[in-house]
Image: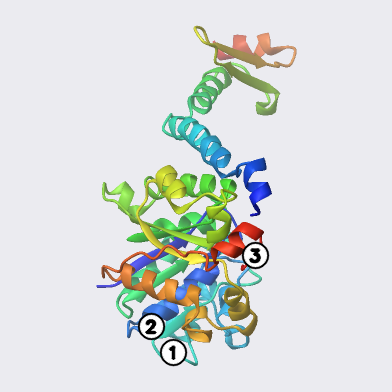
Amino acid sequence: MTLFKMFRRGGSAPIARERLQLLLAHERGARNQPDLLGILREEILAVISRHVPFEPDKVQIKLDRGKSVSTLEVDIEIPNGFGVALAKAS
Amino acid sequence: MAHVVVVTSGKGGVGKTTSTAALGAALAQHGEKVVVIDFDVGLRNLDLVLGAERRVVFDLINVINGVAKLPQALIRDKRLENLHLLPASQTRDKDALTDEGVAKVIDELRGKFDWIICDSPAGIERGATLAMRHADAAIIVTNPEVSSVRDSDRIIGLLDSKTVKAENGERVEKHLLITRYHPSRAARGEMMTIEDVLEILSTPLLGIIPESEEVLRASNIGSPVTLSNALSAPARAYFDAARRLRGEVVPMIVPSENRGIFNKLFGRKAA
């Protein structure tokens, strides 16, 4: 490093360190959480499939985490005539 | 008692295979009986780095499938009679690697060797998780670079949760091996320092391998760097790391730039 460069700018290593510290603090926290969405998805599908026939890929489950409220959105496409199946099941 | 050690990193290209070869050879040079196992099914390279690529007949998958007996698949190094290689398969599907199969092979090796060093593939898929599964100790190979450090952190998480030791409430002993370290770039603030990496990963340091042309030369000629040029800076660093692995207390030498004040001021690069 020349004298000129030394005064012009510092190295990028401190930026790398700071970015990593922030990111890893976040990732380590998330790592110990159980896969809530995965568990909910499996159990919800199990319950519904007991009563209504549906194609598993026509199901969308979304979990949005807000600051004070989180929302769980379940969107299932059910073929017409499911009432017949429902009546049979009950 | 045999030590089962996994050499792992998450990220590819950081020096797992080079380090497995160098540390395996260094331990064998100390008189220890060593076997190095390549877990990178489909992309084996430990044979090539050790110069044994033309001697592979049977591999790990053959042993697991019962096609070959373990002694038939082990390749003894031509230079070090204490060093053995169990190669990976080059063609077979990596699904052929089973937990029970790997457990059986490692169990059999425990009776024959002092050190069983498992060279993990990159990533966190089957090959990588099976390579670490039965480990007593882990060497996490890290470059002082953001993506490598992040992946190492992830691997440390897996070592603490997905290994047999972790599942039994024990701990896998973890060691950090920092490779491709440029002392001059770290001094200029262009590369994270050893302290930076240690602070972020909070894992005990096994060694610091400086960036060196000797490492490429060693793999070019198919020889661990501890054999090809035992006096070179990376070889000495690997020898020290191997001694620490054996439990010896060896002072840690942080590689430094060998440049005078004149060169520093006027920008002549030594490295």
To the question of a shared chain for discs 2 and 1, the answer is yes
Question: Chain under label 1?
Answer: B
Estimate the x, y position of residue B21 in percent, counting from the top left. 49, 75
Badge 1 marks a residue whose secondary structure is: loop
Most foreground residue, A8 or A74: A8
Q: Earlier in the sequence, mark 3 or mark 2?
A: 2
Gap between marks 3 and 2 measured at Cα: 36 Å
Which three-letter amino acid code belongs to the residue tagged 1? Leu
Which three-letter amino acid code belongs to the residue tagged 2? Ala
Q: Quadrant of residue B206?
A: bottom left
Q: Earlier in the sequence, mark 3 or mark 1?
A: 1
Question: Chain under label 2?
Answer: B
Q: Quadrant of the N terminus of chain B?
A: bottom left
Gap between marks 2 and 1 measured at Cα: 7 Å
Which three-letter amino acid code belongs to the residue tagged 3? Lys
Question: Chain under label 3?
Answer: B
Q: Which mark is residue B80?
A: 1
Instruction: Tell me if B204 is positioned left or right of B149 in this view.
Output: left
Instruction: Tell me if B260 is positioned left or right of B136 in this view.
Output: right
Most foreground residue, B220 or B160: B220
Residue B134 seen in the current view = no
Most foreground residue, B195 or A24: B195
Name the residue located 49 percent from the left edge and 50 percent from the top edge: B152
Name the residue located 56 percent from the left edge and 74 percent from the top edge: B46
Name the residue located 35 percent from the left edge and 67 percent from the top edge: B4
To the question of a shared chain for discs 3 and 2, the answer is yes
Marks 2,1: beta carbons within 8 A:
yes
Q: Which residue is mark 2?
A: B28
Badge 2 marks a residue whose secondary structure is: helix
Q: Which residue is mark 3?
A: B269
